[in-house]
Image: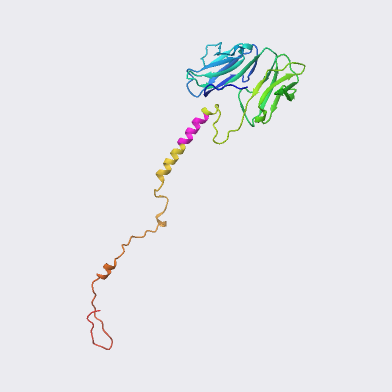
Amino acid sequence: MELAALCSVFASLRVLPSRSQFFQYESVTLSCELHGNLSGWRIRRTIDQGNTTEDCPSSSNRSDSVCFIRELYYWDSGVYWCESAEGKCSNKVNITVTALDLILEAPVLPVVEGEVVTLGCRNRTSSGFSFFYKNRLLVGNSSTGNWTIERVSKSDEGFYQCSSSGRDYFSPDSWLDVTGVLSSGETPAWPLTPVLLPVVGVCLLFTLMLLFLWRNLKGKVDRSVSYIDVTITPDVEPRRIRDVEDTSTFYSMLNLAGSSQQLDQC
């Protein structure tokens, strides 16, 4: 399943109930989620029948960013997304509507490696033993109708479907999209972008504040030091040789033992 990315992803399309397969005559609500003003956003779809692109036919008086379909029909199967007047887009969701009595309940949005993923085989008319297939190969079975992948990995990505005991038909295919764990420097997928951008901004502002305080405090006297621990050495101006030679001559009387001779100068 390849969907061409015709515009940049800025919003998120949510589906309630959160699955991609629906029985005919069920109802569904699709809504655009955006951290900001949703004015000008609308829900668009490309339906499988005729490959026609159009606005989502909402049966309520809600805004264009919410589409409520009271009764689904097989011709409502197709790709749905949110789109702004400037050409910005949300993620794309493939919705399948079937007239059969068997559907596969699988995550409608991509799952992250390591998560627990539960697939459900839902029969509208009866209950029984269920069989689960990946790319047309049997991978599991369950008496409860649910089959769990404990730690999903990229190798689990593929098309899944189920069948019920006593039935000779299968549910429609659902693509399980598995995304890897983000490495350092890798750009997060669109659901995280609106959340991470404010967090990164706050962290950057906090870092700049700390840097500003550190630069102001750098070089200042540590007022916690006691003057008892400080030895003050006065500055003594060195005397030049010329100053020593200019010292005035000193005269005195010297009495020599055993002689009355006087020295007039020394």
| Residue at x 59% of width, y 17% of height | 79
| Residue at x 26% of width, y 70% of height | 245
Q: Is residue 79 left or right of residue 135?
A: left
Which quadrant holds the C terminus?
A: bottom left
Q: Is residue 265 left or right of residue 125?
A: left
Q: Is residue 196 magenta?
A: yes
What is the basis of the colouring in this image?
rainbow
Q: Is residue 160 magenta?
A: no
Which quadrant holds the N terminus?
A: top right
Residue 47 at x, y = what percent? Answer: 59, 14
Residue 105 at x, y = what percent? Answer: 66, 20
Quarter holding residue 99:
top right
Q: Nearer the viewer, residue 33 or 57?
A: 57
Q: Is residue 201 above or below residue 47?
A: below
Q: Nearer the viewer, residue 261 or 38?
A: 38
Specify start and end residues of the magenta stretch as a single range. Answer: 195-205
Q: Is residue 106 visible?
A: no
